[in-house]
Image (cartoon, rainbow, N blue to C red):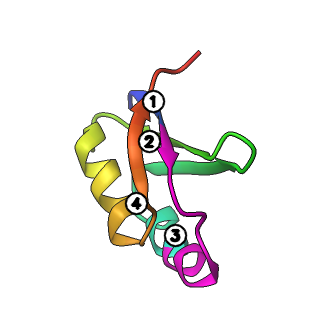
Amino acid sequence: MTQMEVLYRYGVAPGEAEMRALDNVREVYGVRGIRFNEKDRSVRVEFDASRFKEPVIAALLRQAGIDIQENLALA
């Protein structure tokens, strides 16, 4: 297993429906964690890179209704 993290900036803050939809994303085998930073309007996803590539993670978040704007560099 190769653990990776990706950081995205989002536009519209997720509401209750989007947060419920994220519960389904968290249950996807290979997604290890999702953390929001409301101050920076960012979401960090930890995942198994041997199972997924970054575009798949972005697609999962968008399917859950998260307004992904851009991929940010991890510090």
Task: Find disc 2 in the rendering and name its residue.
Answer: 47
Q: CA distance from mark 1 to mark 2?
A: 6 Å
Dot placed on the residue nearer the N-terminal end, 1 or 2: 1
Dot placed on the residue nearer the N-terminal end, 4 or 1: 1
Q: CA distance from mark 2 to mark 3?
A: 14 Å
Q: Which residues are magenta?
A: 8-21
Mark 1 belongs to which amino acid? Gln
Q: Residues within 10 Å of mark 1 (few under 14, many from 20)?
A: few
Residue 71 percent coordinates (x, y):
39, 34
Residue 62 percent coordinates (x, y):
35, 63
Dot placed on the residue nearer the N-terminal end, 2 or 3: 3
Q: CA distance from mark 4 to mark 1?
A: 18 Å
Q: Residues within 10 Å of mark 4 (few under 14, many from 20)?
A: many
Mark 3 belongs to which amino acid? Leu
Task: Find disc 4 in the rendering and name its residue.
Answer: 61
Residue 47 percent coordinates (x, y):
44, 41
Q: Which mark is residue 22?
A: 3
Dot placed on the residue nearer the N-terminal end, 3 or 1: 1
Can the viewer see residue 51?
A: no
Task: Find disc 1 in the rendering and name its residue.
Answer: 3
In the image, 48 versus 60, the foreground residue is 60
